[in-house]
Image: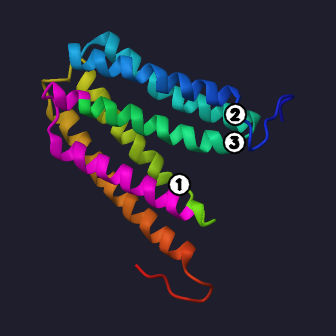
Amino acid sequence: MTDTAFGPSALATPANYVTIARLLLSPLLFVAIADGGAGWLIFAVWTALCLTDGVDGYLARRHGTTRSGAFLDPLADKVLVLGALVALVAIERFTWLPVLLIAAREVAISMYRSYWARRGVSIPARRSAKLKTVTQQFAVAFALLPPIADDPAWVADTTLWAAVGLTLGTGAQYLYDGSRAAAPAGAPPSV
């Protein structure tokens, strides 16, 4: 244990500072992507912002998780990934269909989890949701990495479609988990 622990309602925590920094730096990255496309500096910034997700997680586990962190961390992940995907669509590196599928699922499941949370039902994230986020991050990374950004472009495109599959699959898992958590004791789930 550490000498500084934060309670669940704390806002000003080291983990939250890292997460907020990710949120604030993300729009600068999106502009850089839309302006320049693939490049070593953009790839390095993307990688650093993705790796800070692990840093804020480490800090949260070390100093205590908070409700604000539980909200901000996935929000930062979604803003970072969706913003980068949209920027890549804007420069015609990716097409709209996979990005729209990912965005629709992210918004729908966030609303679904919020709906149940307001009713006192928690739908915790599964490990597969983390794999989904990492696969989305790799799709963007491959589209920004100069040696493979355009040739062979199929690496980024294939990874993006794998991310779509994982994104939709984890969405179905959340719907199933929510129906099970909300079902009255002894009643079968309604999915």
Q: Hey, what amino acid is under mark 3?
A: Thr
Apparent side of residue 109 relative to residue 59 in the rendered image (left or right): left
User: Label 1, on which residue?
Assistant: 125
Task: Report if residue 9 lies within the magenta region.
Answer: no
How many marks are shown on the rendered structure? 3
Could you classify mark 2 by the number of other residues whose Cα lies within 10 Å: few (under 14), some (14-19), or many (20 or more)? Answer: some
CB-based contact (under 8 Å), mark 1 and mark 3: no
Q: Position of residue 17 (x, y in %)?
A: 62, 24
Residue at position x 48%, y 27% in the image: 23
User: Label 3, on which residue?
Assistant: 66
Residue at position x 71%, y 28% in the image: 12
Against 171, is 134 above or below?
A: above
In three-dimensional space, the C-alpha distance between marks 1 and 2, rounded to whole angstroms, equals 21 Å
CB-based contact (under 8 Å), mark 3 and mark 2: yes
In three-dimensional space, the C-alpha distance between marks 3 and 2, rounded to whole angstroms, equals 8 Å
Q: Label for residue 11?
A: 2
Residue at position x 50%, y 62% in the image: 115
Residue 37 in view here: no
Mark 1 or mark 3: name the one nearer the start of the chain.
Answer: 3
Q: Secondary structure at mark 1?
A: loop
Q: Hey, what amino acid is under mark 1?
A: Ala
Residue at position x 20%, y 41% in the image: 158
Q: Which residues are magenta?
A: 87-116
Against 87, is 102 above or below?
A: below
